[in-house]
Amino acid sequence: MEMDHIDKLAASTLDGYLVRKDLVRTFSRQFPVPTYVVEFLLGRYCTSTDIEEIEEGLEIVQRQLKSRTVKAGEEERFKARAREKGSVKIIDLISTRLDAKTDSYLATLPSLQLRDVRIGSQLVNEHERMLTGGFCAELTLGYDAAIAQEKNGRPFGIEHLRAIQLSSHDVLNILAKDREKFTTEE
C-alpha cells in the first residue's frame, strides 16, 4: 500500500489513533472479540509506516488474540491454566457490582462464565465504567488456591486491568490539538 503525504502526516501525528482497515479484515471473525478490540491492538502494534514493523506488529496481534481470547468450549482450559500457573491473561468484557453482604466488589467475566471474581476497589475507582455496563479489557486473572479452600471462597481475582476502549475523557481535546498540525486543505 502506497502512502501519500496526508497518510504519512496522519500516521506521525495521530499515533495510536489510526487503524488501517485492510489490516482489520485480516482478523475478521477469527476470534470471539468485537472489531474494536482488533482495532485497538492494531493501533498499538501496527502504527508504523514501515512494512517490516507492520508485519512484526501483525504477528504480535495474532499471538495475543490467539492466546488471550476464549472460544466457546475453552472456558475450563483457561480456568485450569490460571490455577496451574497462578494467573492467565485474557481479553474479555468486564463488568462489576458491589456485593453489600461482603462489602466488596465482584467482577463478571462472561467468556469464562465467572460471576464472582474478586476485584480491588482501587481498580473499580480507576475504571468506573465497570459499574455501568462494563467494557472490554486486557486482564490478568489470578487464582489463589488458599482462598479456594475457604468456605464460599472466591479464588479468581483480577490482578491487572488495561482498558481497551478509549477510557480517556480528553480524547477529543487531544484530537483537536493534533488537528492543528494539518492545514485546512489537508
Image: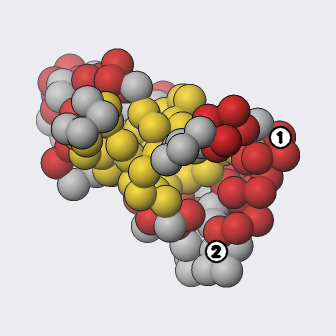
Amino acid of disc 1: Lys
Q: CA distance from mark 1 to mark 2?
A: 20 Å
Residue 116's spot in the image, x, y percent?
43, 51
Give the mark nearest the N terminus, 1 or 2.
2
Q: Is residue 102 visible?
A: yes
Q: Callout 1: 10 Å neighbours few (<14), some, many (20+)?
A: few
Judge by depth and name the residue closer to the eye, 42 or 22.
Answer: 42
Residue ID at (76%, 65%): 77
Q: Where 68 falls versus 113 (above or below)?
A: above
Residue 140's spot in the image, x, y percent?
61, 38
Judge by depth and name the residue closer to the eye, 33 or 174.
Answer: 33
Mark 1 residue element: helix
- Which circle, 1 or 2, is nearer the viewer? 1
Q: What scheme was used to colour the molecule?
A: secondary structure
Residue ID at (79%, 52%): 81
Q: Callout 2: 10 Å neighbours few (<14), some, many (20+)?
A: some
Residue 133 position by quadrant: bottom left
Residue ID at (20%, 38%): 100
Residue ID at (32%, 23%): 121
Residue underneath mark 1: 85
Q: Where 168 falls versus 83 (above or below)?
A: above
Residue 55's spot in the image, x, y percent?
77, 51
Residue underneath mark 2: 71
Outermost residue toward the front in this view: 151
